[in-house]
Image (tube, grey):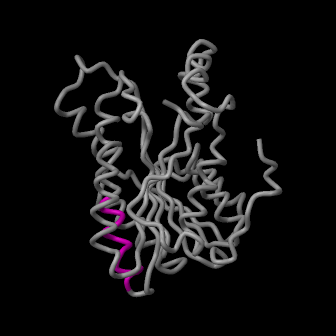
Amino acid sequence: MSDPDRFARYASLADRTVVVTGGASGIGAEIVTAFAAQGARVGLVDLDAEAGQALADRLGDRVAFARADLRDIDALRAALADLAARQGPPTVLVNNAARDDRHDWRDVTPEYWDERMATNLRHMFFAIQATAPGMIAAGGGSIINLGSNSWWEASGNMPAYTTAKSAVHGLTRTMARDLGSHRIRVNTVVPGWVMTERQKALWATPEALEKHRQRQCLPDLIPPVYIARMVLFLASDDAAMCTAQNFFVEAGSV
């Protein structure tokens, strides 16, 4: 694995204003930490007030936290407006928040289905809608949506989640077209099975890990830092000609 001290530094990210949804833990917290290390001003939105504020406090005064349940679009809009008032309108949006709870297709009710769409998809569009005007005024920006390779792999046991995540790619491509004339880039980062604390606690049994290793081309399990590194690249000026694309970080999983 790479030595973190040898990771790239992107001069264009210094002082850039970034918002990360679901930024209090897991992949989101890794993304927030990575942007802060680049000298960006970072706002994170999360339902977990204790973890979100603790992360902001640990990373310093250039990182701000706003609490919101992203299933409540009015609360999301208020949180984004609060962060913009404190830090300035963001020119980078990372739509990270999601929850991959397992569920049997036989047990899914219409109410559960709608709640899964609200948790894993709907807020992404409304976060774009809320932040894109500021990016237009600034002359450009970068929006990074987090997808999942679970539906590419035809994973089972979570049909509402994989359906929502497959729709992220459609959202990315249509918004890349609608916002491209304003020099706003929209891309999807597609993680494989990333070893967050949640995954390790709930599903990463020795048997499941061995089975998954056999599906990957690379033998190493994926730490969240590598998802953050791809997000940084897509937010930076180095990726100025990248839009409407999927960027896989999944160790060649098939």
Whether residue 84 is in magenta: the answer is: no
Q: Relative to residue 173, is residue 217 depicted above or below?
A: above
- The tally of labels here is 0
Which residue is at the front of the view, 121 or 221? Answer: 221
**Residue 249 percent location from the top left of the image:** 56, 45
Q: Which residues are magenta?
A: 125-136
Q: Is residue 83 left or right of residue 178?
A: right
**Residue 195 percent location from the top left of the image:** 62, 34
Q: Extreme left residue here?
A: 110
Q: Residue at x 49, y 52 (%)?
A: 247
**Residue 154 percent location from the top left of the image:** 36, 28
Q: Extreme top residue here?
A: 207
**Residue 78 percent location from the top left of the image:** 37, 67
Q: Relative to residue 182, is residue 195 depicted above or below?
A: above
Q: Is residue 207 left or right of residue 247?
A: right
Which residue is at the front of the view, 96 or 180? Answer: 180
Q: Residue at x 63, y 74 (%)?
A: 13
Q: Residue at x 63, y 43 (%)?
A: 224
Q: Is residue 72 left or right of residue 15?
A: left
Image quarter where the N terminus lies is top right
Q: Residue at x 54, y 53 (%)?
A: 23
Q: Relative to residue 20, is residue 203 depicted above or below?
A: above
